[in-house]
């Protein structure tokens, strides 16, 4: 559960998820399903080999029946330069002709360059040139149309990705996951040297001139049995520096909801070898030697009070936490033994 929450809190988690969703939506759903690219009005030269042969069979059959020179020249020009090569692969069985004479005669007239054919074809030289030019223009228009269709689909997909990504970025900024004003964060006074049983005094304070890297507010409430809050710490440039968080450390009594008598505050620095922890204990738990000794294994123990501040330091990070609000629960358990509500304000600085 803690690992999942840490992943959610990373600044780049939601933009990456949003980009993937937008890509799937734009490419798969819109590009391949709702509005796929459709090829229409393809030229004979763009067809599969099987359909090219069928086309030439129909051209030959039409020419044998009608002897229309202009029409056959136009059809051959639209087919392209490899018409002769495909005609050589035709057979009567493939074209469903009764004999091989139709194919042989057509080849002799159109591709062998015999004198009789040349003589008859000479008057149509200008026509053939015009038809060839028209066929080339037709192929160009079809290619341009296909390119425009593909380009439009790509633009539509990119537009969807940008819209979804922009909406996700706006939501993250609103929720505070991305801080656009880190450079202008207010400067705070840092208190150092917290002792377990001694309240902080102004004598131990020193001014930290570094701007705040991040500020978080977290609240535990009675009944939140899965309370485990964590936050990512990033530099103003977006570089990951570490993490911090608050979670349940100890409960008292039995039954639901859990009666939390201690919370642990932890700080992880990517440049440090260990994660440091402080345990915030209720008055009753702190005064119980056995409980205090057991929780001391997790980290420094503190008897928490309203308005209290404490500092945690790693190799490059400094955390100051302030107890904004604290209310003890009132029930059959010992007085001041577990929390009804506890709110912490956490501020992070680069260590000077």
Image (cartoon, rainbow, N blue to C red):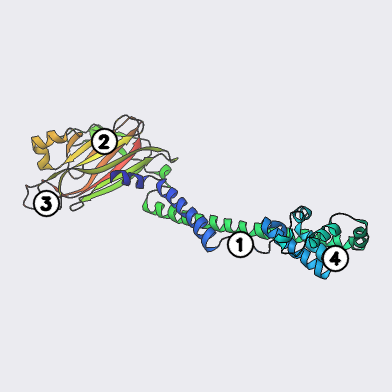
Residue at the image position 7 percent from the left and 47 percent from the top: 335
Between 145 and 202, the residue placed more toward the observer is: 145
Q: Residue beneath label 4, please?
A: 69
Nearest to N terminus: mark 4 or mark 3: 4
Q: Secondary structure at mark 3?
A: loop
Q: Nearer the viewer, mark 2 or mark 3?
A: 3
Q: Residue beneath label 1, please?
A: 38
Q: Residue beneath label 2, please?
A: 311
Q: Is residue 287 left or right of residue 227?
A: left
Q: Position of residue 115 (x, y in %)?
A: 93, 57
How many residues crowd around disc 2 within 10 Å: few (fewer than 14), some, or many (20 or more)? some
Q: In this rendering, is residue 352 above or below 84?
A: above
How many residues crowd around disc 3 within 10 Å: few (fewer than 14), some, or many (20 or more)? few
Circle on res. 255: 3
Q: In this rendering, is residue 203 above or below 109?
A: above
- CA–CA distance between discs 2 and 3? 34 Å
How many residues crowd around disc 4 within 10 Å: few (fewer than 14), some, or many (20 or more)? some
């Amino acid at each position: 559960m803690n690992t999942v929450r840490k992943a959610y809190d990373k600044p780049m988690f939601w933009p990456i998820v949003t980009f993937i969703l937008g890509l799937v939506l734009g490419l798969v759903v819109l590009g391949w399903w709702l509005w796929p690219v459709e090829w229409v009005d393809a030229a004979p030269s763009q067809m599969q080999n099987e359909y090219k042969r069928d086309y030439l069979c129909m051209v030959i059959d039409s020419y044998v029946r009608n002897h229309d020179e202009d029409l056959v020249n136009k059809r051959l020009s639209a087919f392209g330069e490899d018409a002769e090569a495909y005609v050589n692969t035709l057979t009567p069985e493939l074209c469903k002709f009764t004999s091989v004479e139709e194919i042989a005669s057509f080849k002799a007239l159109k591709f062998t360059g015999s004198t009789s054919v040349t003589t008859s074809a000479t008057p149509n030289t200008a026509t053939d040139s015009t038809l060839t030019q028209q066929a080339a223009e037709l192929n160009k228009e079809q290619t341009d149309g296909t390119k425009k269709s593909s380009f439009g689909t790509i633009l539509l997909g990119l537009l969807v990705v940008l819209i979804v990504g922009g909406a996700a970025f706006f939501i993250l900024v609103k929720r505070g996951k991305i801080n656009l004003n880190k450079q202008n964060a207010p400067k705070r006074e840092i208190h150092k040297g917290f002792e377990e049983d001694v309240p902080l005094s102004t004598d131990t304070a020193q001014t930290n001139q570094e701007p705040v890297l991040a500020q978080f507010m977290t609240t535990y409430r009675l009944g939140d049995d899965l309370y485990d809050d964590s936050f990512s710490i990033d530099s103003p440039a977006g570089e990951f520096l570490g993490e911090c968080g608050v979670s349940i450390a100890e409960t008292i009594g039995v039954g639901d909801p859990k009666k939390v008598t201690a919370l642990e505050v932890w700080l992880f620095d990517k440049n440090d070898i260990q994660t440091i922890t402080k345990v915030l204990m209720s008055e009753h738990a702190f005064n119980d030697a056995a409980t205090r000794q057991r929780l001391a294994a997790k980290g420094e123990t503190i008897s928490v009070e309203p308005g209290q501040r404490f500092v945690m330091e790693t190799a490059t990070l400094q955390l100051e936490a302030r107890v904004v609000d604290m209310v003890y629960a009132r029930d059959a358990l010992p007085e001041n033994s577990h929390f009804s509500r506890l709110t912490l304000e956490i501020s992070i600085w680069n260590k000077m």
